[in-house]
Amino acid sequence: MSSRAVDYDALEATTSVEGMTYDDDNQEILQLLKDDHGDFPCLCISEEVYGNREYLPYSSEELGWLGHFAKKSAHLVEFSVEGDKAFNNCSQQSVDRFFEDIGKCNRIRKLHFFGRNDLTEIMRKLDPAIKNNNIKHWSSEGCHLGETEVNHIFTAFRDMAGLEELSIQYYGIDEHDLNDDIMAGCIPSLAACTRMQKLKLILLDLSTSSCAALSAVFPRMAALHKLVLGENSIGNDGVEVLIRGLAECKQLHSVRLYDNRIGDFGLGCSSRGLPASVDTLDLASNEIALAQQLPLLRFKELDLSCNTMSTGGPRVIAASLANPQCRLETLSLLATNIGDEGAAIVAESLRCNQRLTIMNLIQNNITDTGWNAFVPILCNPASINATYDSNHTLQDMGYDHVAYNDDTYISPDIQSELSLNLCQNKSRVAAAKILKTHRHLDMRPLFDRQLDLLPYAVAWLDRFADYHLDIKLSSMFDFVRAMPMEVVNGVAGGKKGKKRRWRSA
């Protein structure tokens, strides 16, 4: 029986969910939709069911029931379709009617499509929902994209003035037939999306022309917070063009341009030209060599992974890390050809750095020689003062007790110091390192304060030497033993006061 011939309104009162589908999981979802339950805001049609309330329809009539309840839901705000085989058990007529029903869901705010080859047709069927101007999030991943598809999709964005998040990622096995000129012709449609906060255009062959088109629409996206243009062909020239358009995006926080053939010039442009609000820059898998002095101070998070550094690259990095104005908190240098010599240079720059908490050094051919350069930086055993002034901020260097290849791994000593640095109370970190490194505390610098300092010494040891009872006892003994007897006598009989009479209980 065709799904179009079924009068679901008439049958609803007399048909149980068990009569609509034999699948237990589908029965649960249909019941939630029928009851318009607030705990079911997202409907995902998928060719694979993972137990996360995905729905795989097993018949045309079942799909009809799904659309019937979905279009009446007051709580359904998100809809997604995953995989080309999701509707294999249903007739084309029932699929068409289902999308017509979804198009009537006025409360849908988010649309997601994964691995579909009919994106243009789906968008046409959802046209009523799109033109309601309620769509805030739209994403496609791994869907077939040709010139026809992107033209239709981007034309639809003209009716999405309320769009806040847009993500288009082409991760298909086959090559798409897009190019820079095609994308440059589509991008102006985004000018209507004045509320855009997150924009992702990945693996779409964007280059200089597309960057010029984006640069023209960015001034209309004052709320833009995150920009991701990874795996394109932007290059240094494209970066320069993009930055001109981003000047007025005062809320922009994160820019990710990984795998885009960008070199040192593009990094320099980004450092100088991006809005002051940008604190995250991802330039992984590019052509950055750091062959010239470039300031890396302004960002809180910088990813330079999978760039082949020049021999002078580590010194450029070290110059920024040693600068008191450096704001870096996370620096990823995975697979950047650092080596032992570079590791030693970078390590020394961390001696006074109090901001960097994460520095990924995986896959850099660093041996024990290179790693050992970090040991005195994290915990300098030369003296108590030197230990106190060690780096108590760095917490992660990319390794977690795991050898990534046969001859390169982080030593347990370094991992131990990094673990101590996880504590937010840096006074406690310093004390723990002192007590761990200096097994016998020298109390002589405190003797000139005499017994006045004893309560403070005891309190400090009580606070920080919980697991070092031997140090606590020996230190207090040394302190008290050093006090001359005349000081003790002076404290005991220095001032005479009135005799006090003990009261009986």
Image (cartoon, rainbow, N blue to C red):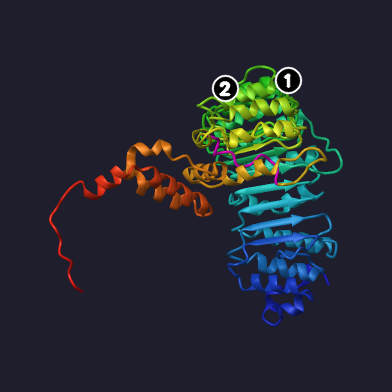
Q: Which mark is residue 272?
A: 2
Point out residue 53 in the picture as x, y percentages from the top left corner: 71, 65
Farthest-out residue, left: 498
- Badge 2 marks a residue whose secondary structure is helix
Q: CA distance from mark 1 to mark 2?
A: 24 Å
Task: Please tell me whether residue 323 is drawn above or below residue 305 in the rendered image.
Answer: above
Residue furthest bottom as drawn: 14
Q: Quadrant of the N terminus?
A: bottom right
- Residue ID at (74%, 30%): 336
Which amino acid type corresponds to the residue marked 2 in the rendered image?
Answer: Arg
Residue most toward the right?
174
Asked whether the viewer can see residue 312, the reply is yes
Q: Position of residue 167 (x, y in %)?
A: 68, 43
Q: Which mark is residue 420?
A: none
Q: Please name the residue shown 69% across and 47% down the image.
A: 139
Q: Is residue 488 above or below residue 72?
A: above
> Circle 1 sits in a helix, a strand or a loop, which is it?
loop
Label 2 Cα neighbours within 10 Å, binned few <14 / some 14-19 / many ≥20: some
x and y percentages locating residue 267 in the rendered image: 65, 24
Image quarter of residue 213 = top right
Q: Which residue is mark 1?
A: 311
